[in-house]
Image: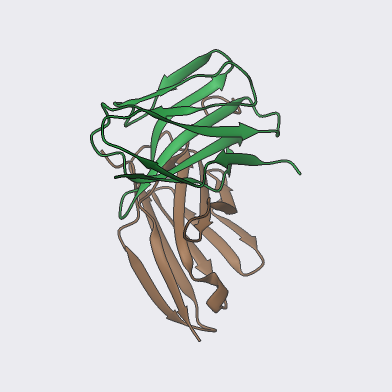
Chain colours: A green, B brown
Amino acid sequence: DGGITQSPKYLFRKEGQNVTLSCEQNLNHDAMYWYRQDPGQGLRLIYYSQIVNDFQKGDIAEGYSVSREKKESFPLTVTSAQKNPTAFYLCASIRVNEAFFGQGTRLTVV
Amino acid sequence: DQQVKQNSPSLSVQEGRISILNCDYTNSMFDYFLWYKKYPAEGPTFLISISSIKDKNEDGRFTVFLNKSAKHLSLHIVPSQPGDSAVYFCAATANAGGTSYGKLTFGQGTILTVHP
């Protein structure tokens, strides 16, 4: 089945650690996005990529990094510079203004 | 600066009645609007959309209304069902001359609870 796969579903990070969230899609979409959801704040855009080997910062990119070496993959690294990383992270691919979302990764700092 | 706002954090409705979820936007460049439904610990799923050339779009129990002059859209669910209980996000994008890579800007979400 075509879709967006995020892994892991739950992730625990110690303070000071970098962690990488995986996002894979087999929809053949060019554009991929990372959003963060916090209670009462909706979905905020972290990074997005419209084509392989190119990406742009979203509204809250500080403390995050991404890569887009393959069309199918858009991993997000949460670095130690991100001061409040505990959140629900959503990856999406977009075709003609419609976003298809993965199931999300819940990241918790312990 | 919140370009898409859902000012009601929550809405409670009786089963069978109408649910009306509201969304306001400030960016006049937005020309395409979408509603998404989200259950806890899952990704949002697409519900319905509307282009700025229309003022209404209907799909079964779901109808979206767009008032461009007021920069306001609303989602009507009739009749509401307990399974509709979820968080609803509105989203907007500027089509940028027809590219297919529209950046979606989301509102904060409204938690809808439909009581049996």
Task: Write down the quadrant of residue B12 in the picture.
Answer: bottom left
Instruction: Say whether residue A95 is visible.
Output: no
Tell me: residue B59, above or below residue A27.
below
Residue B104 at what x, y percent from top left?
47, 37
Which x, y percent locates residue B93? 48, 37
* Residue closer to the observer: A73 or A33: A73
Q: Quadrant of residue B26?
A: top left
For residue A88, above or below residue A46: below
> What is the count of numbered marks?
0
Q: Quadrant of residue B99?
A: top right
Task: Give percent across and percent down for residue A34.
Answer: 46, 34
**Is the residue A79 above or below the residue A15 in the image?**
above
Residue A17 drawn above or below residue B79: above
Residue drawn at 49 percent across, 71 percent down: B85
Report the side of B48 relative to A16 (left or right).
right
Q: Position of residue B34 (x, y in %)?
A: 53, 48
